[in-house]
Image (tube, rainbow, N blue to C red):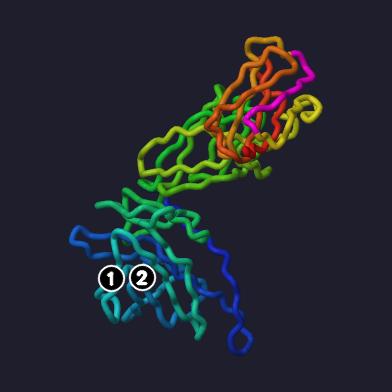
Amino acid sequence: MKKLLLIIFVIACVTISKGNPIATPIVTLSELKFESNGDWVIELQYYYMDNRITIDSIWIKSTSGISRLKQFDIRGNICVLLVRNDSLMSDLNINPVSDSIQIIFSSYGYSHMSEPVTYGYTNGMLKSPRAGQSIAATSNSYNNTYSLDNSPTIGGFNDSTGMCGSIKGHIYDKNNQLLTRTNLGFSGLAQDFSPNPDGTYSARIYSCNNHITSFDDYILPYSGRKNGVYISPIYVSIEPDTIVTVDIHLLGSVVDGIDKVQMNEESLFRISPNPIKDLSFKYEISIPVKSSTSYIELISLSGQKMGQFPITENTGKINLPANTANGMYSLRLFVNNKNYATSKIIIAGE
């Protein structure tokens, strides 16, 4: 049986006649599905927090126009309402390839508009739903979060079944060492996850075009002790029930003392010139590096490794590849396969 995920909203209060505070109702797009004949059906979810509340009108808006519901019967604190073209005062075209859907409703003379749910556009968050799929609100829909859904639940409350794929890979701390602390958990995807003892991870993620730049982290799962940590940005497009491999690189410390370099990085690893103008730079390192496993890595802002350069002396010169583009990069110093320092550089060719 699917696990029910109820959505909790923070309700703003308004004041009407006689000074009685009444909670503003919420009406939001819960799910959109296209039938095999091209007809659409919309599931609205409403939160009716007080028996005194009256919703005067509900409108559906797409890129082609706007139409008002003929009638509706709202009962109870929370429920769903199905809308089809014959539910509206005039036909409304919703394009299955790409469109933008907005819910507008009026209560006590005040109009309320949801954020548009947009799909099918280049660089957008959502792809167009395929046959048998829907676009469904996630359990965080108060943040306007939506996902493709392989298991539509039109007429019932949404759950996460069919809405997620998975990402897996390795997770590295800010010194590019595998993170193996299994008592350290992260949240910020569809599911919380912890590193495995070998530094790998696996997590469920909603089926959309995800752009992830940070996580919440906490010691001991569900302990409530949370701190944010930035990561090298991840851009990953997920389809329901698929798996994508992507490594995660943390940019900050997640637990005091877990990955702090004991030496001052600026005195440990010096480069010149900076900015770099002829695709070469000199380095000076203040710890012994006579090792076959000592090297300097060139890393782009997106976390991609652009080059690895072995070093056997404390001073030297490195020539970068001729196709290295101008921009900002990181240089990471590894000695005996341990990341001791990271330095930012700018490449500004003539």
**Residue at x-position 77% and y-position 29%:** 265
The residue beneath circle 2 is 62
Residue 256, image x, y percentages: 74, 34
Q: In the shown orientation, is residue 16 left or right of residue 91?
A: right
Q: Residue furthest bottom?
A: 18
In the rendered structure, are the residues bearing label 2 and label 1 in contact, judged by CB atoms less than 8 Å apart?
A: yes
Number of labelled discs? Answer: 2
Q: Which residues are magenta?
A: 278-288
Residue depicted at x 42% and y 35%: 244
> Looking at the image, which is closer to me, 169 or 316?
316
Residue positioned 61% across, 20% down in the render: 309
Q: Looking at the image, is mark 2 or mark 1 earlier in the sequence?
A: 2
Kindly state the secondary structure of the residue where label 1 is placed.
loop
Residue receiving disc 1: 93
Tell me if I can see residue 146 in this picture: yes
Q: Secondary structure at mark 2?
A: strand
Q: Say above or below: 223 vs 104.
A: above
Image quadrant in which the C terminus is located: top right
The answer to which quarter of the image holds residue 10 is bottom right
Q: Position of residue 341 (x, y in %)?
A: 72, 27
Q: Give how far across and how far down residue 226 sits, in percent.
A: 67, 44
The verdict on residue 285 being magenta is yes
- Check disc 1 and give the amino acid type: Asn
| 167, 48: nearer the viewer | 167
Q: How many angstroms separate mark 2 from mark 1 (CA)?
A: 7 Å
Q: Residue at x 47, y 69 (%)?
A: 114
User: Dot 2 surroundings within 10 Å: few (below 14), some, or many (20 or more)?
Assistant: some
State the image quarter where residue 220 is shown. Answer: top right
Q: Which mark is residue 9?
A: none
